[in-house]
Structures are given as C-alpha cells and as structure tokens.
C-alpha cells in the first residue's frame, strides 16, 4: 500500500432523519405544583441582587398603588452550561414585542415594570439602538458639533418627549435578567410584591422562556474542555418547571394574566394556545408564529372563539406596530377584569 495515501478520517458527525429529531408523541410535562416550586427554588439559588431589586419594586408599587401597573417580560432567557459562564444556550428573541408593547402600555396610562433580558431592546431607545437602528446613522456633523440629521428631527423629538415624560413621572422601571434562574426568581418575587395592586396588576408575559435547563448541582464550575466529551458532548437538561399555574393561583391571585404562545407550525398554534389556557387557567393566551409575529396574532380566551388581530397591507406598508392594536384590545379586557373584581382604577 502507498504510504502517502492518507487513511480516511474518523467519522465525527452523526447523521439521521430530521423528522425523527423530536418525538411529538411524548406526553406534556404537567404544570408545577407546590413541591416542584420548593424543589426548584430551594435548589437553585436566587441572584445576589434580588433583595435590593425587590425593594426598588416595593417603592414603585407604593408610588402607583392606585394606578394600573403592568409587568412586561421581554427577551430570551439563557441556560448557562458552566458556572463561570463561557457558553450558554440562548434563543432568537430580541425583545421587540416586549419593548414595543411597553410603549403602548405607557401611552394607555399604565405604569410599566419592564423585566427584560439585559442588552435586549428597551422601550423608546429601541428606535435608535442595535445594528438595525444604530444611533450613529441618525447623526451628522455640523460646524464641528454632533447634531441629529434634520430628516429625523421630528420623529426623534416625539420619541424623546415620550421617554422623558415616562422618566419624569416615574412610570417605567427597568429590571434586567440574563439566565432562566434569574428570570424565575425575579418573576416570583415580583409577583408577590405586586399583590397589593390586586386586579390593577396586569402580567404580560412576552419573554421567550427556556424549556430546558441545567440544574445548579450539575453545572460545572469551569469552562467545558473540548476533549471533555471524547467524540461527543452529551448534555443532560431537565425540563424547566411550568410555573404559570403557580403564578395564577398563588403568586399573583387577583391579577390579570396574559401569556404568549410561540409556534412555528401554523397547524398547531390554536390548539396549543387553547391547551395552555386550559392548563394554567389564566385570562388570555396570545398566539403567534415565528414567521408572522409582526403582522398577526391570535387572542385565545375562555368562552370565546379565537380572535385574530392582523395588520392590513396598508398598515404594514406604513410601518404600523401590531402592538398598537394589541394593547388597546388588552386594556379593554383589563377594564372589565377590574370592574368584575370590584376594584377601582
Ligand atoms: C412570544 O411569543 C413573543 O411574542 C416573541 C417575540 C418571543 C415571539 P421578538 O422578541 O419575539 O419580538 O422577536 N413570547 C413567548 C414565547 C414563549 O416562550 N412562550 C412559551 C411557549 O410558547 C410559553 S411561556 O411555550
């Protein structure tokens, strides 16, 4: 045999059928009950900053005790693979839905607690941030000074005024998270802190929350080495407990609760949204598809047929935000909720 002919490389990649990648026959993971809550929160430590964050929230709630307050969650949670984290699992969400919705809630007279993935889009600054709206593209140099390009003046002034009004009136509280664990601890502590608002509290859960995570006791301290897994790195993830039912029943009784359901397959969107509503017994599920989430959503609520909200082609061309239609529809429902609960505001 010619010694110059290299031997075939060792095969390192698996092959297989894509259709078999996910087993859709596996039954649903049941909603979390009390013991699951203890298990999770006793074994996954709270973030160090939580106490001081919550005391800020208590102040905010005191200030707005007679107002409507919405908790908007926004952006994706991460799943760290190492304690000193180099690598983590993430998802696509940039926080557009959450940041845009927060602006329309403010316009509708709500105080907003914005629980968001750190560095994702924020209300108002979203118009001038990240790579698609880089703030430098709105500036020019004039006589050695930086000024806003005249063609953006009017729009920027309007955004700036709204932003400053929200700040001056203490209407917007920004709270960041990064990991799924930080998100869950913060969500629970926040929910309890909002209880004095009773039905005036509204939960608008738009964050894209991880379905699987690595529990604290299985996270290695240091960076996983490339040789660690031999030919493969196998990850062992636990399902994230489904806490929505706990939130509805125990953490925030009396509040109106809205969750989002995201799918990519249009044929299952409605049934999955309805299933979520029945499993968690809350007031509204907003279904959306990854591909069309900016132009259509569907409201699924108890005792009512599914209700689609869609931008017309004209609205789409004019750049209308679908949230400008979603939020007033929610405000109407929240008004009824408050009335039926016997509270005011
Ligand atoms: C949503 O469905 C949001 O509308 C989006 C917004 C994440 C699609 P963008 O940030 O996207 O504007 O680009 N959020 C909820 C997603 C989610 O994880 N829902 C869970 C599920 O579908 C229930 S909590 O099972």
Image (cartoon, rainbow, N blue to C red):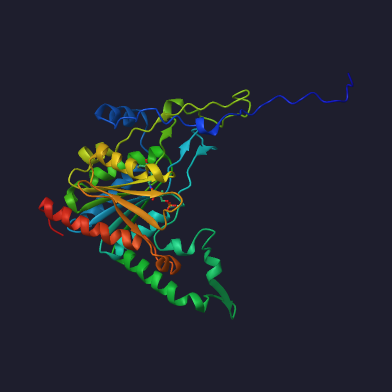
Q: Nearer the viewer, residue 67 or 145?
A: 67
**Rendered image quadrant of residue 123:** bottom left
- Residue at position x 44%, y 56% in the image: 121
- Residue at position x 23%, y 43% in the image: 282
Residue lying at the far left in this picture: please name it.
Answer: 342
Q: Pinpoint residue 299: horizontal percent, then vertical percent.
A: 29, 51
Q: Nearer the viewer, residue 96 or 119?
A: 96
- Residue at position x 19%, y 47% in the image: 303
Q: Is residue 167 left or right of residue 219?
A: left
Q: Is residue 157 above or below residue 291?
A: below
Q: Can residue 171 be seen from the camera position used here?
A: no
The quadrant of the rendering that contains the C terminus is bottom left
Q: Is residue 319 left or right of residue 60?
A: right
Residue lying at the far top in this picture: please name it.
Answer: 1
Q: Nearer the viewer, residue 168 or 158?
A: 158
Q: Pinpoint residue 262: horizontal percent, then vertical percent.
A: 39, 45
Q: Pinpoint residue 77: horizontal percent, then vertical percent.
A: 42, 42
- Count of numbered labels shown in the rendering: 0
Residue lying at the far bottom in this picture: please name it.
Answer: 143
Residue lying at the far right in this picture: please name it.
Answer: 2
The quadrant of the rendering that contains the N terminus is top right
Q: Pinpoint residue 323: horizontal percent, then vertical percent.
A: 35, 60
């Amino acid at each position: 045999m010619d010694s110059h002919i290299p031997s075939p490389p060792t095969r390192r990649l698996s092959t297989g059928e894509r259709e078999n990648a996910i087993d859709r026959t596996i039954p649903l993971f049941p909603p979390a009950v009390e013991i699951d809550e203890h298990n999770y929160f006793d074994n996954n430590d709270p973030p160090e900053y939580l106490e001081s964050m919550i005391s800020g929230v208590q102040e905010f709630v005191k200030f707005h005790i007679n107002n409507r307050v919405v908790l908007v969650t926004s952006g994706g949670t991460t799943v760290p693979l190492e304690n000193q984290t180099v690598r983590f699992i993430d998802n696509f969400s940039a926080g557009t839905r959450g940041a845009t919705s927060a602006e329309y809630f403010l316009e509708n007279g709500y105080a907003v607690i914005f629980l968001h993935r750190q560095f994702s889009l924020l209300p108002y600054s979203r118009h001038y941030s990240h790579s698609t709206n880089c703030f430098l593209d709105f500036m020019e140099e004039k006589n050695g000074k930086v000024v806003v390009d005249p063609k953006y003046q009017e729009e920027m002034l309007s955004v700036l005024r709204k932003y400053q009004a929200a700040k001056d009136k203490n209407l917007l509280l920004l709270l960041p998270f990064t990991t799924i664990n930080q998100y869950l601890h913060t969500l629970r502590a926040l929910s309890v802190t909002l209880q004095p608002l009773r039905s005036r509290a509204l939960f608008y859960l738009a964050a894209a929350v991880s379905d699987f995570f690595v529990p604290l006791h299985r996270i290695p301290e240091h960076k996983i080495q490339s040789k660690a897994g031999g030919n493969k790195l196998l990850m062992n993830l636990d399902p994230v407990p489904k806490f929505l039912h706990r939130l509805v029943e125990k953490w925030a009784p009396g509040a109106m609760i809205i969750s989002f359901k995201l799918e990519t397959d249009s044929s299952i969107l409605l049934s999955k949204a309805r299933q979520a509503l029945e499993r968690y017994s809350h007031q509204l599920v907003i279904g959306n598809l990854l591909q069309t989430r900016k132009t259509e959503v569907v409201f699924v609520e108890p005792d009512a047929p599914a209700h689609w909200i869609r931008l017309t082609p004209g609205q789409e061309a004019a750049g209308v935000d679908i949230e400008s239609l979603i939020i007033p529809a929610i405000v109407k429902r929240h008004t009824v909720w408050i009335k039926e609960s016997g509270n005011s505001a």
